[in-house]
Image (cartoon, helix red, strand yellow):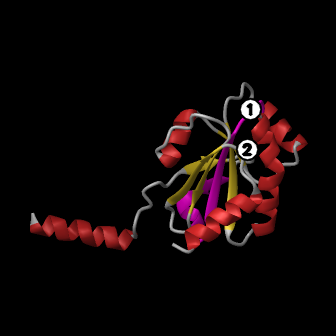
Amino acid sequence: MKRLLIFVLLAWCALGQAWAGDFELKDTHGNVHKLSGYQGKWVVVNFWATWCAPCLDEIPELNALYEQHKGKDVVVIGVALDYNNPRDVSVFAENMFVTYPIVLGTYRMARQIAGIHVYALPTTFVFNPWGDLVVNHTGAVTRAGIERYIQESSLK
């Protein structure tokens, strides 16, 4: 038993610490996004729908956040929910000039990402550079609001 425990601990150390909330999402362009693949960056996952007015209001804010931090310290991923046709979501995102990756999602997927039910849209989760969920926000977000969350969470 003691040898088994030592073996398990050594294997765990060799593999590195697993991210408890790791997820894998494929966007509408076929790119795969894994939380663990963004180690060292803040990850913003925003759940939205084409019919949701507050969701539409936050798209320019999320675009601005994405563009300002692109390739640096923040990743933005939009997860579309409640859609009938995947093509409609892609066309909608193009017409709204969405620059960040869009994933076609489900409510079940949302639970797997953060272990939390998404009851209202929009809902945004922010993960710190170590993969810990630090923000669960229901309602529209702004670029400044997310940057404030990041700054406040960095100070803790």
Query: Separation of disc 1 and disc 2 at Cα?
Result: 9 Å
Can residue 37 be seen here?
yes
- Kindly identify the amino acid type of the residue bearing the numbered disc 1: Pro
- Kindly identify the amino acid type of the residue bearing the numbered disc 2: Thr
Question: Could you tell me which secondary element the residue under label 1 belongs to?
Answer: helix
Q: Locate the N terminus and report the quarter of the image it occupies.
A: bottom left
Range covered by the magenta-colored residues: 31-51
- Residue in the foreground of this view, choosing between 147 and 82: 147
Checking the image for residue 28, the label placed there is 2
Residue at (56% x, 58% y) in the render:
35
In the rendered view, does 16 fall on the left or right side of 90? left
Residue at (75% x, 27% y) in the render:
85
127 in the magenta segment: no
Can residue 99 be seen here?
no
- Residue in the foreground of this view, choosing between 82 and 154: 154
Residue 149 in percent (x, y) is at: 63, 63
Q: Quadrant of residue 42?
A: bottom right
Residue at (57% x, 72% y) in the render:
154
- Is the Cβ of the residue at disc 1 closer than 8 Å to that at disc 2? yes
Residue 75 in percent (x, y) is at: 68, 61
Q: Earlier in the sequence, mark 1 or mark 2?
A: 2
46 in the magenta segment: yes
Q: Which residue is mark 1?
A: 86
In the rendered view, does 8 fall on the left or right side of 143? left
- Residue in the foreground of this view, choosing between 106 and 14: 106
